[in-house]
Image (cartoon, grey):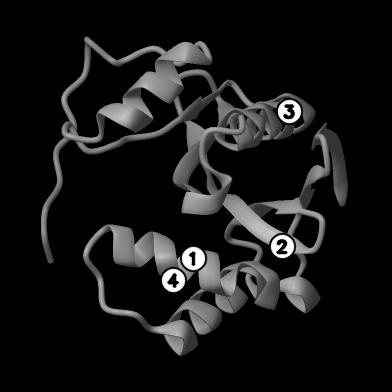
């Protein structure tokens, strides 16, 4: 599943391999900065390389020609109730120059394709309550807001 066969004009989406991790490092760092983290290209490179080396995530990269314009990172998990795989869409980011062109929607479609291909039960994600742009994108592509469960966390 190197090339997911999706394109918008010259935009292609493909799965990032360890030897191509550099293609996504700057976007990943920009994504972290969006969430008010300090720039850290070395840390971004190390984090992504470790996830890919350990096969702990799948990173999908949207490129416009040779320029990286967006990415999605998914983590595998499982549902004990259904006894099936689920995918956590943990990170989705489109560069400012790539926004408004359908790249976010194409990345979401590629994530859905991955879930189908792997026999997953569902994709899940969370976003900030104030990120209305992302909420609109998700809802416009068929994602449903959970009205049944609360999310809890324990800082350690």
Q: Which secondary structure, mark 2?
A: strand
Q: Residues within 10 Å of mark 3 (few under 14, many from 20)?
A: few
Depicted 112 relative to depicted 53: above or below: above
Q: Position of residue 59 (x, y in %)?
A: 64, 55
On the question of residue 33 being in view, the answer is: yes
Give the residue at mark 1: 28
Foreground label between 2 and 4 = 2
Q: Residue at x 32, y 35 (%)?
A: 126
**In screen coordinates, is 22 left or right of 148?**
right
The percent coordinates of residue 106 (x first, y second) are 66, 31
Q: Are the residues flagged by discs 2 and 4 in contact, CB closer than 8 Å?
A: no
- Residue occupying image coordinates x 87% and y 51%: 2
In percent of width and height, residue 32 lies at 35, 65
The residue singled out by tag 2 in the image is 67
What whole-number distance in Å separates the C-alpha atoms at marks 2 and 3?
Answer: 23 Å
- Residue 13 lies, with reference to residue 49, above or below; the image says above
Sequence-wise, which precedes: disc 2 or disc 3?
2
Q: Residue at x 71, y 62 (%)?
A: 67
Q: Which residue is mark 4?
A: 29
Q: Quadrant of residue 137?
A: top left
Between marks 1 and 4, how big is the CA–CA gap? 4 Å
Of callouts 3 and 1, the N-terminal one: 1
Q: Is residue 87 above or below residue 58?
A: above
Are the residues at dot 1 and dot 4 in contact (C-beta closer than 8 Å)?
A: yes
Q: Earlier in the sequence, mark 1 or mark 2?
A: 1
Q: Residues within 10 Å of mark 2 (few under 14, many from 20)?
A: few
Q: Is residue 49 left or right of residue 13?
A: left
């Amino acid at each position: 599943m190197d090339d997911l066969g999706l394109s918008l004009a010259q935009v292609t989406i493909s799965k990032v391999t360890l030897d191509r991790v550099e293609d996504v490092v700057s976007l990943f760092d920009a994504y972290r900065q969006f969430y008010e983290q300090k720039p850290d290209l070395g840390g971004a490179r190390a984090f992504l390389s470790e996830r890919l080396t350990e096969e702990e995530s799948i990173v999908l990269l949207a490129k416009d020609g040779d320029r990286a314009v967006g990415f999605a990172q998914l983590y595998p998990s499982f549902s004990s109730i259904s006894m099936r795989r689920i995918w956590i869409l943990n990170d989705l980011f489109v560069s400012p120059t790539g926004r408004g062109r359908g790249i976010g929607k194409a990345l979401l479609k590629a994530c859905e394709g991955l879930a189908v291909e792997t026999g997953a039960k569902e994709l899940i994600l969370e976003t900030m309550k104030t990120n209305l742009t992302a909420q609109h994108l998700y809802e416009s592509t068929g994602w449903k807001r959970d009205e049944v469960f609360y999310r809890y966390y324990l800082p350690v």
